[in-house]
Image: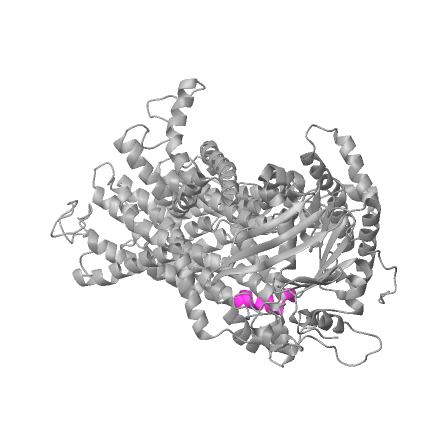
Amino acid sequence: MISRRYLVRRILLLVTVMWTAASINFFIPKLSPRDPIRERLMLAATQGGRNQTGLEAMVEAYNQQFGLDQPLWKQYLTAMLKVVRFDYGYSISQYPRTVNSIIKDALPWTLGLGLMSILIAFVIGTLLGALLGWPRCPRWLRIFVPASMLTSAVPAFVLGFLLIYLFAFQLKIFPLSGAYSRTATPEWSLEFALDIAKHAFLPACALVLFQLGGQALQMRSLMVMTVGEDYITFAEAKGLRPRRIFARYAVRNAMLPQVTGLVMSLGTFVFSTVLVETLFAYPGLGGLINGSIQVLDYNLLYGITMILVFAVCIATLIVDLIYPLLDPRIRYEKG
Amino acid sequence: MVATASQTATMLTPRSRVGRATSVLRYLRRNPLLVIGLAMFVGLILFATVGTFFIDPAKDPYPLAGPASKPPSAEHWFGTDAQGRDLFAVMVVGTRLSLKIGLLAGSIGLAIGIVLGLVSAFYGGWLDSVIRWIVDVMFTIPSFLVMVVIASLLRQYISIENMALILAAFAWPGPTRAIRAQVLSLREREFIRLARLSGMRGPEIIVRELLPNLTPFLLAGFVAALIGAVYAALGLEMLGLGSQREPTLGMTFFWMQRFSALLRNLWWWWGIPIAIICVLILSLYFISFSLDEWANPRSRRSR
Amino acid sequence: MTSTSTAPRTDRAAGTGEPVLSVRDLRVEYHTDAGAVRAVNGVSFDLMPGEKLGLVGESGSGKSTIALALMRMIKEPGRIAGGQILLHGRDILRLPEKEMRQVRAAEISMIPQGAMNSLNPVARIEDQIVDTLEDHSPKRVAKKELLEKAHAALESVGLRREVGRMYPHQLSGGMKQRVCIAIAVAMEPKVLIADEPTSALDVVVQRQVMGTLLRLQEELGVAVVLIGHDMGLMAQSVDRLAVMYAGKLAEVSPIREIFDDPLHPYTDLLIDSLPKLERRGTFRGIPGLPPSLHSLPPGCLFHPRCPKAMDICAEQVPPYREHRPNRFVACHLHEEGHATA
């Protein structure tokens, strides 16, 4: 069914991506003049009021702990192996918590917020775009074209900020930040679920509005191109119902590059999610990134980055596997 | 039907200059989006350039230029922020800086993209495969994350210039892919074959035949790279990973967040920068949208 | 098979019964930046049941526009500016869209020019035949029955049933064109418009496809409008030939008579441009270019290129008249006072 060569090529690509990202993450800090360990210790020293005697000994101890005193090639090898095993070590700032455990706590929030918003945005946006691109689009719907342009151009975090101002600050309908109220206790109850929903609403809106516009515009231009194709003309000559031509002939074909476009937009999506979470102080991976930057926890930053790169790779692979199911031209390669 | 020689001659005659000028005007009239975008962009540039006459660029955009957290007044037209920066000066200088970063990164990215795209498409073979592979990898990596890693390591040492370099390092895959695709489609067209037959060599063909036909794509690619760079710069800065000293637009957003401008009701501190950011991005976006339409005419040729 | 000695079709156009298709003074306009343009400028002709009418002309003469107009599929920036198209006496230009949709494929159908792209890339062949049938039947018909019909249609064009399960990209150009023919005749329409059905194919496949088309035509007795620019193909295939120039009809005559004695100078030049075995040497084209529809010459549209042009040709538009029995032509040469041998 699916060409083996195609599959192998895609997996090879993703492995290369992971390896490249891991290598970049390994080498760049080596090139920088900064020493995260030393800096972190200095930070702790100034904050905790401790003096700096014995600093060198502490640095050496930490270096040994984190394996930073080994020759470079050995470090590289261990680092790569660690990535393969998803072992990111201990968090520098929250020692002795491991990076993985911190990530595990944050992951569900990002999955909930991010995954949900991209799905909603894709489904609604594509449908909207398909209608907008169809020649017989109802007039009142056309207003969504400039509307989509606006929301897809303005960055998600700016949208988020405006939403906070309007609905959280002025109108006080929604909370300002966080994933759940400080006074609430996490439990499996309807109350808590509603609390989460209330907190997630504005960030989700920001993300969805931003993505939706982009998906709609893209689908619209794909539809316009598809409608100009010969098979649409012939479909009309066959006397088919307009609804059938719309769904089975136009949308069905325009969906293919639209799905490809979804993969392309994963990068922007990560960008938006990180910034929106930061803005809303949402305890997902995005918020963690921001946190780790502030406290110079390089291990954590590195771990989150690799996890996100891995997630993007998996998502890309899933779409690659779905694609042949949608496009028979790939499924039956010149039979 | 056999085409006569005169028919062929008519097909190859280049369009006259006058014709091209009127068609440009006609195009502008039919594309209000382009006009709006250009107007906004030019307005922004005017603001940034003319505004410098009203400020002291060495003092005003930096902390302690005036009393902290004051609303707009005759003294400080846009008010001051929590650290005493004159916000009008910050906007003027910030717009210029953000544009500078975007232009630098965009130009470098586009330049690399042109070279790699042309080479890849024109010479083909293993060189093409290698370049294509690298581009695919670069595209799949969420570049923002890697930029965050790099920038967070540089921290205090980040300047306008090296931020632009970081951005450029990730800006080139897009133009490369687009230009390669376009050159590939142009390569098979008749006029290239004619050029080859008439004895032109590779580089000469590239410069004299391909590049002029690539102009719409180059422009569209440049604006796209520009938008991407401005976006990425804003994103990095919002996390505090921009120049710590220089008042770029994104850093203003960051400081504004840091000092809770929203909660403290310092509306001028968040309202005005957001407005300027929106104008900048929207104008670039409108221009890019129109250029994309020009580069990919969607209408079918009538039979 | 290049000479015209193959079976001359009997000319049924001589007053036997009612025409199945009657076009009266059809005008189609396109709106461009530089003003409105008449792609079809007052075309009238009749088509008898079972007759094969050829329509030739250079690119831009308006022949493809007529095809779309007959199917009432002219889209912006074009529009049908006037005239009537009578199908079995019913003016289809006045029908509401819902009814016109039912008319398409059931009573009048079209074989497209580029079969390469005329089939939906993501749907199976048999499904593309079935959906036509489905959308024309007023009540639910069992899928099995429709599939049977689809397979029968495939066999009628010489394709195996298994082709039904395939996707378009798995077929060759000739096969795809035959699928289009199968779809077009699936509901046994009265009129079939073939818009350059073989232009994109190589000569061998061209012959096969034309053979299929003509065989089907005989079996079903459907009237055909064959649009093209290949005079040689027309000579082998049609009963009557209509010659178009710059949106107007120059000449319409039975095929034999047109080749033996062309009435319009343009027709003469077209026939002359066919390569002949007896005449070696360079090809002969027609000097000059078709006029731009934005700036049409005064009087007869062809006069700037006509070797037999007279003074009156630059002043008056020649009327389209039946100058010989069943032979229509628009040329001053045949008007009173200018008749030549």
Q: Can see residue B42?
A: yes
In the displayed structure, does residue B75 sit left or right of residue C199? left
The residue lying toward the viewer, choosing from B101 and A58, is B101
Vertical position of residue A176 compared to residue C237: above or below: above
Residue C1's x, y, as percent? Answer: 86, 64
For the N terminus of chain A, the quadrant is top right
Report the front residue among C25 and A147: C25
In the image shown, does C331 or A251 lie closer to the viewer?
Answer: C331
Task: State the residue lying farthest toward the left.
Answer: B74
Q: Residue at x 54, y 43 (%)?
A: A310
Question: Left or right: A87 with respect to B128?
Answer: left
- Judge left or right: residue B199 versus residue A277: right
- Seen at 20% across and 47% down, the residue is B81
| Furthest residue in direction front, as rendered | C337
Asked if the magenta segment contains residue A131, the reply would be no
Position above or below: C95 against B197: above
| Type of secondary structure dominating the magenta stretch | helix
Image coords of residue B126 (percent x, y): 65, 65
Check the image and report above or below for B234 versus C290. Answer: above
Residue at image position (50%, 54%) is: A24
Q: Is residue B61 above or below residue C280?
A: above
Q: Which residues are magenta?
A: B115-126
Residue C115 x/y as whole percent: 71, 53
Can residue A333 be seen here? The reply is no
